[in-house]
Amino acid sequence: MAELKLPVSEERIRELEVGDFVELTGRMITGRDAPHKWLMEDRREDVLPFMKDTVIYHCGPVVAKHDDGSYDFVAAGPTTSIREEPYQADVIGRYGLRGVIGKGGMGQKTLAGLAEHGAVYLHAVGGAAQVLARAIPRVERVFMLDEFGVPEALWVIEVERFPVMVTMDSHGTSLHDEVEGHSQAKLKELLGSTG
């Protein structure tokens, strides 16, 4: 498993292919439904430096706030990414993202955006929220906490050896499409044999 330092260059991202396992170390940001819409309403110059050449994590974390005002992630599992399909390619292009982390994959618009802008979709393990939170040693800051609440806020986090797998790459390949194609073919075969 290779370590991928964030921020990361487009050239390095274009070297990755579906099936590669990587561990992320560096700065990334979380964001789900509300932030994607908010990010596209206009160019958020205040958020841009925290997104360029890094990844956005589709995650609604459980967060502990300490007496000194600092935060820690208690649970940080991936949420289903397809909900962000209407916005994701545009957010990648506008903010210079190099990747998206989530679960379940995304659609053709995002796949085309990954190829155009030099980005990848990274699958995180579902059901391992507390384990993944251990790979997040520091919360740097948060945007839109009061407006969106803890799960929907944009959390700028430092990660250390955060494990993911490339399931959509910048070459137009999607493991999710391949699995769906094989599943459809098998279903057709099974249904044909019952007639």
Image (cartoon, rainbow, N blue to C red):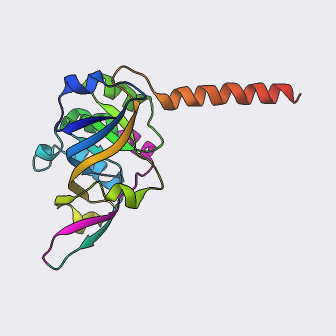
Q: Where is residue 163 in the image (x, y as percent from the top left)?
A: 35, 44
Residue reaching furthest to the right: 195
The tally of labels here is 0
Residue reaching furthest to the top: 171
Residue 129, image quadrant:
bottom left
Residue at image point 32% right, 34% down = 89
Residue at image point 19% right, 60% down = 139
Give the left or right position of residue 175, taking residue 120 as reference.
right
Q: Where is residue 42 in the image (x, y as percent from the top left)?
A: 18, 45
Residue 9, image quadrant:
top left
Residue at image point 37% right, 32% down = 110
**Residue 144 or 74: which is nearer the viewer?**
74
**Residue 47 or 10: which is nearer the viewer?**
10
**Residue 157 or 113: which is nearer the viewer?**
157
Q: Where is residue 122 in the image (x, y as percent from the top left)?
A: 37, 38
Q: Position of residue 112 (x, y in %)?
A: 36, 25
Q: Is residue 2 above or below residue 45?
A: above
Q: Is residue 66 above or below residue 12?
A: below
Check the picture and name the quadrant holding the C terminus.
Answer: top right
Residue at image point 32% right, 58% down = 133
Residue 157, image quadrant:
bottom left
Residue 121 magenta: no
Give the left or right position of residue 48, taking residue 57 as reference.
left
Identify the magenta region.
68-86
Residue reaching furthest to the front: 1
Check the picture and name the quadrant holding the N terminus.
Answer: top left
